Amino acid sequence: MQFCRAQSLDAALEYLAEWGADGCLLAGGTDVMVRYNKSEIAPGAIIHIEGIEPLSLITTHGRTTIGALNTHRGLAGDAAIAARHPAMASAARLVGGWQTQAVGTLGGNICNASPAADLAPPLLVADAHVTLASMRGERRLPLDEFFIDRRVTARRADELLTTIDLEPLPEGSAEVYLKLGRRGAMDVAIAGLAVRLSLQEDGSVGAARVAVCSLAATPRRVPEAEALLLGARLEDDALAAAGQALAGAVSPIDDARGTASYRRRVLPGLLARAARQCGEEARQ
């Protein structure tokens, strides 16, 4: 196996063009090294990209643009992210332990395409798009089109995910990420839920976005629940209906962390809690 250290974006793209599917990108390594040590992957080349400085930038002109090499710890402590994307800042604090947060990157979390990726639901409710670069040029995709299946994405073998851009929280809106697990952090989520709501002057919901992880083969938006929240007041009947729609729309599995029936059973309460919290924060 060959080790290739890319110190610029151009160098990384040249290595990817050379190695294609036989090249493996490495930044923080929190997923790649685990899979390598388990013999789940056997690349011909490791392409190390951790030192490419432009991929660690954050810009806040209009939409927020986040370089793929920003770490979870960095996102959790960034003042602009906390103000514009509080659900993502919250989720970043719940990814693994502090060692993982210190080196694990946003781009790695997305490209790993785990069904349980904590950062994915907050990104999805913020209308996130990814930019993919190669020697052939760039293309931009909505995040919900980037996720194809469990650990399968739309990234081509010669492409590097460079940035993620997303819509900041509008005025009069609030968002929250709730993670159900055996512990608040460290554990993979039994279920993860992000909600972004905007309230109208009469207190009804003017816009609603709901996204989940650990409840399907990929993290995903749930339009069935969004439709029932739209125009509703955050009262028991409306929240119960949206919660039942959410539970019926997902496709969880039985695994070591929880059963599919348990995951469905807790979702209505989780959604009601998230929606009420959004309502209180939006009114403030």
Image (spheres, rainbow, N blue to C red):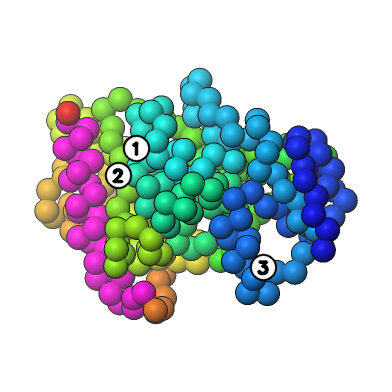
**Residue pictured at 41% horizontal, 64% vertical:** 188
Q: Which residue is mark 3?
A: 36
Q: Can residue 119 be seen from the camera position used here?
A: no
What element does badge 1 sit on?
helix
Q: Amino acid at mark 3?
A: Tyr
- Residue at position x 41%, y 27% in the image: 80
Measuring from the top left, give residue 178's x and y in whole percent: 30, 53
Q: Is residue 274 magenta?
A: yes
Distance (Cα) linking label 3 and label 2:
34 Å
Percent from the top left, x then y, of residue 126? 43, 39
Residue 40 versus residue 159 in the image, above or below = below
Mark closer to the chain start, 1 or 2: 1
In the image, residue 200 sits, relative to residue 225, either above or below, namely: above
Distance, label 1 to label 2, CA atoms, is 7 Å
Amino acid at pointer 2: Val
Report the front residue among 236 and 179: 179
Res 53 visible? yes
Q: Closest to the observer: 197 or 263?
A: 263
Residue 153 lies in magenta, yes or no? no
Vertical placement of residue 6 versus 42, above or below: above
The amino acid pointed to by label 1 is Pro
- Relative depth, front residue between 180 and 262: 180
Task: Find residue 176 and name its label.
Answer: 2
* Residue 86 tag number: 1
